[in-house]
């Protein structure tokens, strides 16, 4: 009887741990921090983790912008954002280069 009880406790602990990990995992693209103030007020901060793209042979900034811009968005504006975010002085890309996406 004791062995069955211990087995049940261990199984329960394993499943509980899995549920806690899932609950705290959240979205893979965001990091969330919550804090409580001295008077019981709560605030939350979320930061988005930047997406990246690896430049393939023949890729251009225009191609990358066209592929990743929000539907109906301005491709030229997205190209300018790519230039700014990645500190690029020109639109010349190199195979294997990693670009951060806006």
Image (tube, rainbow, N blue to C red):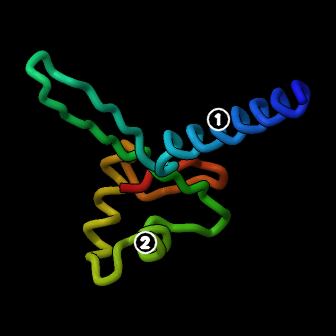
Instruction: Give the number of the disc on residue 37.
Output: none
Instruction: Give the number of the disc on residue 62.
Output: 2
Circles 2 and 1 in contact, beta carbons < 8 Å: no
Q: Return the x and y of residue 18 as percentages of the image width and height.
A: 66, 41
Q: Nearer the viewer, residue 66 or 25?
A: 25
Q: Nearer the viewer, residue 56 or 5?
A: 5
Toward the left, the furthest residue is 39
State whether residue 63 is above or below residue 54.
Answer: below
Q: Residue at x 73, y 36 (%)?
A: 14
Give the quadrant of residue 58.
bottom right
Helix, strand or loop for disc 2: helix
Q: Please state, as top left, top right, bottom left or bottom right, where the C terminus lies in the image.
A: bottom left
Q: Return the x and y of residue 3 as percentages of the image width and height.
A: 91, 27
**Disc with the residue nearer the chain's start (2 vs 1):** 1
Q: Return the x and y of residue 67 as percentages of the image width and height.
A: 48, 75
State whether residue 56 is above or below residue 52.
Answer: below
Q: Nearer the viewer, residue 95 or 64?
A: 64
Label 2: few (<14), some (14–19) or many (≥20) C-alpha neighbours in 10 Å? some
Q: Is residue 43 left or right of residue 3?
A: left
State whether residue 45 is above or below residue 100.
Answer: above
Label 1: few (<14), some (14–19) or many (≥20) C-alpha neighbours in 10 Å? few
State whether residue 59 is above or below residue 42.
Answer: below
Q: Is residue 71 left or right of residue 56?
A: left
Q: Residue at x 42, y 55 (%)?
A: 101
Q: Which residue is mark 1?
A: 17
Q: Return the x and y of residue 77 as percentages of the image width and height.
A: 25, 67
Give the quadrant of residue 82.
bottom left
CA gap, disc 2 and disc 1: 46 Å
Q: Residue at x 8, y 20 (%)?
A: 39
Q: Which marked residue is nearer to the observer: mark 2 or mark 1? A: 1
Toward the front, the furthest residue is 1
């Amino acid at each position: 009887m004791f062995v069955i009880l211990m087995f049940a406790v261990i199984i329960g602990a394993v499943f509980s741990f899995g549920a806690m990990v899932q609950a705290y995992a959240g979205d893979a693209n965001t990091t969330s921090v919550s804090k409580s103030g001295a008077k019981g007020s709560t605030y939350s901060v979320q930061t988005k983790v930047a997406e990246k793209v690896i430049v393939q042979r023949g890729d251009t900034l225009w191609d990358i912008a066209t592929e990743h811009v929000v539907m109906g968005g301005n491709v030229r504006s997205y190209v300018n954002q790519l230039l700014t975010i990645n500190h690029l002085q020109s639109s010349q890309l190199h195979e294997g280069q990693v670009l951060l996406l806006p």
